[in-house]
Amino acid sequence: MVHFVGAGPGAPDLITVRGAELLGRADIVIYAGSLVNPALLGLCRDGTEIYNSAEMTLPEVKDVCVRGHAEGREIVRLHTGDASIYGAIREQMDELAAEGIPYDNVPGVSSFCGAAAALQAEYTLPGISQSVIITRMAGKTPVPEREALESLAVHGATMVIFLSAGMMKEVAEALLKGAYTESTPAAIVYKATWPEQKIVHCTVGTLASAGEASGIRKTALILVGDFLGGGYERSRLYDPGFETEFRKGGNYG
Ligand code: SAH
């Protein structure tokens, strides 16, 4: 059995309880060494065989799983954040399925949630934005033309941009072709929840220069939108004037 486990954004105690239990039991762990905090490997028992997938190809990862499965061993494939976001897990699952190897998936805290926590921010403020766009600039992996940053930018929604810290000038230019302005608030969050976490507050207009001055070029998210500003409307959820299924108006002063 292979368990795909989300390791969380960095801090070792932000893995799920289920993920931690599986790591503690695993005979073999293949972890994404470029981003997973190695402190998490401290949860493994003595004698666990550990592989760093940053130094491996897909066929090599598959071979470790095929051999481990044939030996009846329990395997954890440890991915950063939540594996469903830029995790390249689909191709691994398809390889395992072709070999008849069973697998399951354990969610993790994605770095975009870690970044919101670091900023003490709420992405979905009433009156500001009720949508979060998760996207990236094209890199080695292309982005479909219809999802180009400048087209997504027409909404002016909360935006979380992965894998693009080395391209802040291009990001800002694309955003300005949409609904954002030079003064729209933005933030760069480097290594959210790690001890070396850094937060840079800026605007879309200053993103490129602030990014350059910070020296941050990878392992960072670019967050954009008025959710980082001061204004918003209060939610109706806790409004004393509104009833919900769980709270009848008037009962709670
Ligand atoms: N599956 C991961 C994303 C993997 S793609 C997740 O759910 O978070 C790798 C990109 O994620 C990095 O280039 C960076 O943009 C972002 N990232 C991963 N960990 C991060 C962290 N702790 N802080 C900020 N960005 C992070």
Image (tube, rainbow, N blue to C red):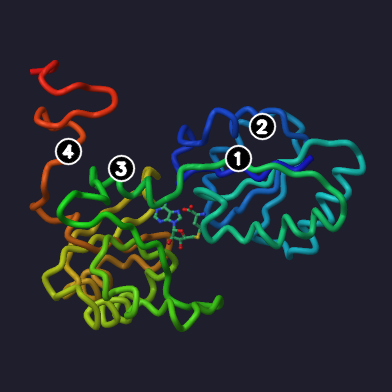
The N terminus - image quarter: top right
The amino acid sitting under disc 4 is Arg
The answer to the question of whether label 4 and label 3 lie on touching residues, with beta carbons closer than 8 A, is no
- Rendered position, 62 above or below 72: below
Q: Earlier in the sequence, mark 1 or mark 4?
A: 1
Q: Which residue lies furthest to the right in this view?
A: 70
Mark 1, residue position: 106
Q: Which of marks 2 and 3 is nearer the N terminus?
A: 2
Q: In this view, does 79 lie to the left or right of 217?
A: right
Distance, label 1 to label 4, CA atoms, is: 33 Å
Image position, residue 244 (x, y; %) = 24, 29
Mark 4, residue position: 236
Q: Residue furthest top?
A: 251
Distance, label 1 to label 3, CA atoms, is: 21 Å
The amino acid sitting under disc 3 is Ala
Distance, label 1 to label 2, CA atoms, is: 10 Å
Q: Earlier in the sequence, mark 1 or mark 3?
A: 1
Q: Which of marks 1 and 2 is nearer the N terminus?
A: 2
Image depth: mark 1 or mark 4 in front: 4
The amino acid sitting under disc 2 is Leu
Distance, label 4 to label 2, CA atoms, is: 40 Å
Mark 3, residue position: 117
Mark 2, residue position: 22
What residue lies at 15% left-to-right and 67% top-to-bottom? 184
The C terminus - image quarter: top left
